[in-house]
């Protein structure tokens, strides 16, 4: 970590900035197999904090975790026509095992609807068995040629929820409930404002009746789909014979859903909050919420400073994730830069004069320079730290929200839309015709992000492309 060369400026090359931050903050690294990534301990700690925030919400809404196998018979994928069509170019196929050619090739799971559908058909017998509410934490593999750490890798880590219900209404309710869970996590834990909406038919999950997403605006004004929730209708139930006996003893097909959030979320956290100094992590998710840097000039000051820091650390540790950087042979300035690059929300500096005055210096990562610095008495430090971390969390959400609002514009006509999506998001009426959507994509590279659930009073309007009547807005932008 001796490399303290300045990062490429975001404005100069956002993509280069992103790659440098991921590697230099030690979140992830490139694996020897092209397209795969290694998530390093710091990145894993961040993902674990995402996991615990989500897992708690999944359990509060009645879900249980289970683990399904990574290998799926090839024939399973072929059972649902749209599903196999959607995934076949991305499949990694195992043809040999134990030194022999397999009778049936096995697919490394690109997602688990098929294998879980197969098991649900065995487990579900009657309406009393419903709903089945299961989530799996794991990884999946989709053969990708153009990859970016966290944003698009062949193997990535995620959770996939799979549920089965007696009625369409219950499945739809579940689909939207989990969209709400994702939005709540994004907003309150990741400090990322998101827009909940329905995907267009072209952007829908292969095999779903309806797909919904939360969309977030990155620092370069591109969009990132941060999570999806799908109402699968009876498509997988019919393909896998997931049936139940209803109250009148009639055999019915189940209605199923699936929903997922992946390590792409880490990419979103980096790109929403990061600045030219590096990462800025929201306190709720940061692996270290506080870094303490003891400072001394003369050797005889060292013992007192370190003793004081240790006493304060012990007071903070029960409530916060704290680390102490007492490495020798590095200047405080070097350490400050490094922890700024790694995005720790709050730095506490303790020097000989602070020890005398019984106070410390607090430096907020979200407010660089003098503006973010303050003094706090050592007495009652945990409460002061708690308040400041809460303020950082709230201010990061507010800043990301203000940035997004400043960069969403209503497009009255097609010329305006083209201009807006060159550097922001357009909100525009769309008739729903895939041809109009395809034209926007061809002309501008912007895609329909989603059709927001909150239509904000949109009345009948005219499609921004063809001028035909349109009932709903959609968001349009470049996207990851
Ligand atoms: Zn149209």
Image (cartoon, rainbow, N blue to C red):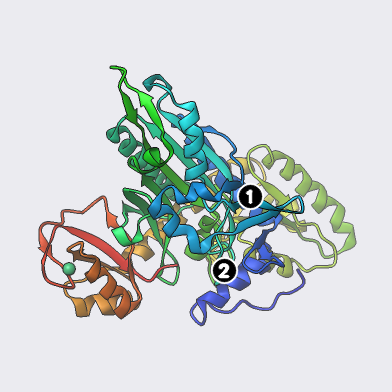
At which x and y percent is residue 125?
43, 23
Q: Determine the secondary structure under disc 2.
A: loop
Residue lying at 46% horizontally and 32% vertically, measured from the top left:
121
Instruction: Give the quadrant of the C terminus.
Output: bottom left
At which x and y percent is residue 413?
17, 75
At which x and y percent is residue 88?
49, 60
For this orientation, the residue located farthest to the right is 300
Q: Nearer the viewer, residue 325 or 378?
A: 325
Task: Mark 2: give few (<14), some (14-19) or many (20+) Cα within 10 Å.
Answer: many
Question: Against 141, is 447 above or below?
Answer: below
At which x and y percent is residue 288?
65, 51
Residue lying at 45% horizontally and 26% vertically, measured from the top left:
124
Ligand 1's image quarter is bottom left
Q: Nearer the viewer, mark 2 or mark 1?
A: 1
Instruction: Report if residue 442 is visible in the image.
Output: yes
> Label 1, on which residue?
103
Instruction: Report if residue 194 is visible in the image.
Output: no
Instruction: Give the quadrant of the N terminus.
Output: bottom right
Q: Earlier in the sequence, mark 2 or mark 1?
A: 1
Q: Nearer the viewer, residue 84 or 195?
A: 84
Question: Against 48, is 206 above or below?
Answer: below
Q: Does ligand 1 reach within 8 Å of label 1's beta carbon?
A: no
Q: Determine the secondary structure under disc 1.
A: strand
Measured Cα–Cα span from mark 2 to mark 1: 35 Å
Q: Nearer the viewer, residue 42 or 336?
A: 42
Residue lying at 68% horizontally and 48% vertically, measured from the top left:
322
> Label 2, on which residue?
148
Q: Quadrant of residue 169?
A: top left
Task: Give left or right: position of 305 versus 156.
Answer: right
């Amino acid at each position: 970590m001796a490399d303290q060369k300045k990062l490429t400026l975001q404005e100069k090359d956002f993509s280069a900035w992103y790659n440098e931050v991921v590697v230099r903050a030690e979140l992830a690294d490139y694996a020897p197999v092209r397209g795969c990534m290694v998530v390093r301990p710091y990145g894993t700690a961040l993902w674990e904090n995402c996991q615990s925030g989500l897992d708690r919400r999944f359990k509060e809404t009645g879900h249980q975790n289970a683990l399904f196998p990574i290998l799926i018979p090839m024939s399973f994928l072929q059972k649902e026509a749209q599903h196999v069509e959607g995934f076949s170019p991305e499949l990694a196929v195992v043809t040999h095992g134990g030194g022999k050619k397999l009778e049936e090739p096995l697919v490394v799971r690109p997602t688990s609807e098929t294998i879980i559908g197969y098991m649900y058909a065995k487990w579900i017998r009657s309406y009393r068995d419903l709903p089945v509410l299961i989530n799996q934490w794991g990884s999946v593999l989709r053969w990708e040629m153009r990859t970016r750490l966290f944003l698009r890798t062949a193997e990535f880590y995620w959770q996939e929820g799979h549920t089965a219900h007696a009625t369409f209404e219950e499945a739809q309710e579940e689909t939207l409930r989990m969209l709400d869970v994702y939005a709540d996590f994004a907003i309150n834990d990741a400090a990322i404002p998101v827009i909940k909406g329905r995907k267009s038919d072209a952007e829908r999950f292969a095999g779903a009746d309806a797909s919904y997403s939360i969309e977030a605006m990155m620092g370069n004004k591109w969009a990132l789909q941060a999570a999806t929730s799908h109402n699968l209708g009876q498509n997988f139930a019919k393909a896998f014979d997931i049936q139940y006996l209803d109250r009148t003893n009639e055999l019915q097909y189940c209605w199923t859903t699936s929903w997922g959030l992946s390590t792409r979320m880490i990419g979103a956290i980096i790109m929403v909050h990061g600045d030219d100094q590096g990462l800025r992590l929201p306190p709720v998710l940061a692996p270290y919420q506080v870094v303490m840097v003891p400072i001394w000039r003369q050797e005889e000051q060292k013992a007192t400073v370190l003793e004081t820091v240790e006493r304060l650390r012990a007071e903070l540790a029960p409530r916060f994730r704290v680390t102490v950087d007492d490495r020798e042979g590095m200047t405080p300035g070097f350490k400050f830069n490094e922890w700024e690059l790694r995005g720790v929300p709050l730095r506490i500096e303790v020097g000989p004069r602070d020890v005398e005055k019984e106070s410390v210096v607090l430096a907020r990562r979200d407010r660089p320079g003098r503006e973010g610095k303050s003094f706090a008495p050592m007495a009652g430090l945990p409460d002061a730290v708690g308040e400041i971390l809460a303020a950082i969390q709230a201010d990061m959400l507010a800043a990301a929200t203000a940035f997004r609002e400043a960069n969403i514009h209503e497009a009255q006509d097609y010329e305006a839309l083209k201009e807006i999506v060159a550097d922001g998001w357009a909100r525009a009426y769309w008739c729903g015709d895939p041809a109009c959507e395809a034209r926007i994509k061809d002309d501008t590279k912007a895609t329909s992000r989603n059709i927001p659930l909150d239509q904000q009073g949109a009345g009948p309007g005219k499609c921004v492309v063809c001028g035909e009547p349109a009932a709903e807005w959609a968001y349009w932008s470049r996207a990851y």
